Amino acid sequence: MRVVAAMSGGVDSAVAAARMLDAGHEVVGVHLALSQSAATLRESARGCCTIEDAGDARRVADRLGIPFYVWDMAARFKRDVVDDFTREYAAGRTPNPCLRCNEKIKFAALLDKALALGFDAVATGHYAQIVEGVDGRRELHRAVDMAKDQSYVLGVLDEDQLARSFFPLGDTVKPRIREEAAERGFYVASKPDSHDICFIADGDTKGWLTRELGAARGEIVDSDGAVLGQHDGAFAYTVGQRRGLALSRPAADGQPRYVVEVRPETNQVVVGTAELLGVNAITGDHARWCGPAPTGTVRVGAQVRAHGEEFPATAWAVGDRLEVRLDERIRGVAPGQSVVLYDGSRVVGSATIAASRLERVTTPSATTTTTTTKDAV
Amino acid sequence: MNAYLDHAATTPMLPAALAAMAEQLAIVGNPSSLHRTGRAARRVVEESRERIAREVGARPSEVVFTSGGTESDNLALKGTYWARRDADPARNRLLVSTAEHHAVLDCVEFLVEHEGATVTWLECDADGVIDAETVRAAIETDPGSVALVSAMWANNEVGTVQNVTAISAVTREHGIPFHTDAVQAAGHVPVDFAASGADLMAITAHKLGGPVGVGALVARREAKMVPLVHGGGQERQVRSGTLDTAGIAAFSVALAECVAGLEHETARLVALRDDLIDRAMALSADIRPSGFWLRGDGTRRLPGNAHLIVPGCDGDSLLYLLDAAGISCSTGSACQAGVPRPSHVLLALGVSESDARGALRLTLGHTSTASDVDALIAALPAAIDRARRARAIA
């Protein structure tokens, strides 16, 4: 096949490109330029869109003897990822930009351009596996290396996208990939992993949001409305967050306080005890299926943040919406993050968390009834 | 099979130049040394200087060897600006054409940002030609403030050849130094420094069959420049650094061979270029050459330059698809940190940003043959079709 290897300049995508070549594909390396400012490209010290990273990717491509190009997707990236990120925070939610980038850029803009230019597929250095199912369909599965598994941020890919994607690293643990990179003579073998958000070069998300949205002094309140402190912008808070609250009054019960709700309309941050964070029902929107959409209720494992734990749950879809009922109460369910559903190691699909709550009655029969009602509506 | 259609980026060394270079590389000798070995090297350098001077209509003492076109432009712009400003602080205004190479534009940007310069941009017409009256008007708003005028002899993207003499006639009237970047012109169209009236002229070896890494700034004796590179005081104290005997020798051999064969090579390349443009235009009604183009003309557009606008395409897609088909060419757009941007030259010529994205620069040189053009024309339709589909979805 003719394959575009997306090359960030890091060790993972370098080995992914090499493995595609070994497998006999015709490979062309493409580095995505995602930053709109040439200055950032030159000066930014980290992330995946610096000039050094483009140079590193080019060095690997040259070593592999494959053509290499830089494709400028900065405008699309700004519109579909960065602006969405800012908008989501402004609305009191906590988005995952990597997921959005996979959905809109790597496996959409990049893939579409590649297909138009005569390529058959895109390969990336994501840690996930594509497995051919019994019916010949391509399924998305977790990586062998659970510590590096990135299937969560790929849970937005549909069947057509998966049919055009390769993740050559999913069957290998990360330390082995570094060894392989060294064996292949890639000098990026010891390059540190990228962390955080690539377009926030200094890693200070709060500072970045404050510059984008402007500081806005507001109140930190408890669930009864009593003012406990001040903040400089509700957008900087995430449900489940404990640190950085700077409460002027300690809680009467001496228990730690957590963010339980962000109210952008009144610029208020609501805090409460850990007790209030416990939820067992999640409503998601923007549901995406990595295969055929399930019918009726399904038993799944639900993961609500990147590298988070997986919890047993029952789920059902209502059009673009997803309902998830967890067997047990869990904490740290933040609106804007994605809930990704697993069946064993297989990714079933995902949705963006719109709301979560504690439901007192969650017997299977009750949920089934609810489904029917909702379907009818 | 590879068709190399990027001679304006760099062209293969001429065999005679390669031989001259290899011969000198095998010999020891620093031209600044006083002993016999040094003297032998010095003789090679000076004879090369004399030959280069002769071939571009200059005096040997006017040839200052540098590392290439970029350094020559830097020395001309910065060196002259500093010298002029030191002599008269009021002279801080640069008059520069909008279609210059980045080696000139980025010097201007540097001087504005860090050295208190101001700039008056000289607009060109749709062909890339600067009218002498534009230069006159720009000077005459405040003649006492002008440090330098810079306008290239031949454009590196669209190949337009400037009427340098008409511009120098105006700068001479006002006694203002005039620099011209002749990197693409020397060896490809007749270049006579003395007759041009220019005060400073940048040339480089690797665009005319010499090696990369050697060039010259041809500078009139009275041109005052503050050096950029300090050290041993070589080259009239203007450009220190051990002279590159082998490179300089090869440069002179290549230039002499180009000039000797100019008439014949011009006719040959003009025929190939016109054939390329005609056949490309026949592929699709909206494909057009940019800049000035007249069939059979080899003096107002560089003989080997074919520059096409392919609307609806991204140049980098075309570049990839043609590369995959064995055609090496250029998008003709400036790369900013590896990211293709619409060419400032095309925008200066009034080409729309959308059309400028679909620019393709195809440049012919001494190794080009009709089979290169055939290969391009065979590969172009499929490439355009795919690039258009890619652009439509992006």
Image (cartoon, coloured by chain):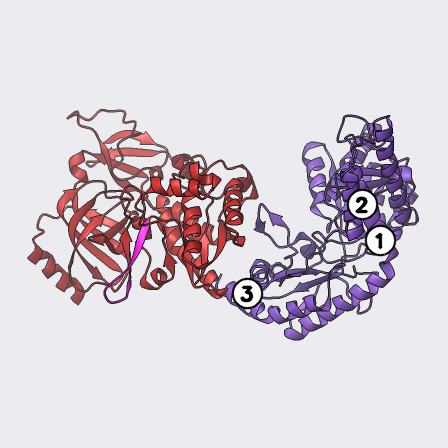
Residue A322 quadrant: bottom left
| Tag in front: 2 or 3 | 2
Name the residue: 80% across, 32% down. B29
Residue hosting label 3: B387
Chain B drawn in what color? Answer: purple
Q: Which residues are magenta?
A: A128-138
Residue B20's tag is 2
Please state which of residues B297 and B346 is positioned toward the viewer in this rendering: B297
Compared to B229, does A308 lie above or below?
A: below
Respond whether the residues carrying marks 2 and 3 are from the same subunit: yes
Coordinates of residue A264 in the picture (x, y in percent) = 32, 43
Please state which of residues A277 and B165 is positioned toward the viewer in this rendering: B165
Coordinates of residue B319 in the picture (x, y in percent) = 59, 59
Q: Element under label 3?
A: helix
Which amino acid type corresponds to the residue marked 2 in the rendered image?
A: Ala
| Tag in front: 3 or 1 | 1
Question: Going from the N terminus, do you reach mark 1 or mark 2 first?
Answer: 2
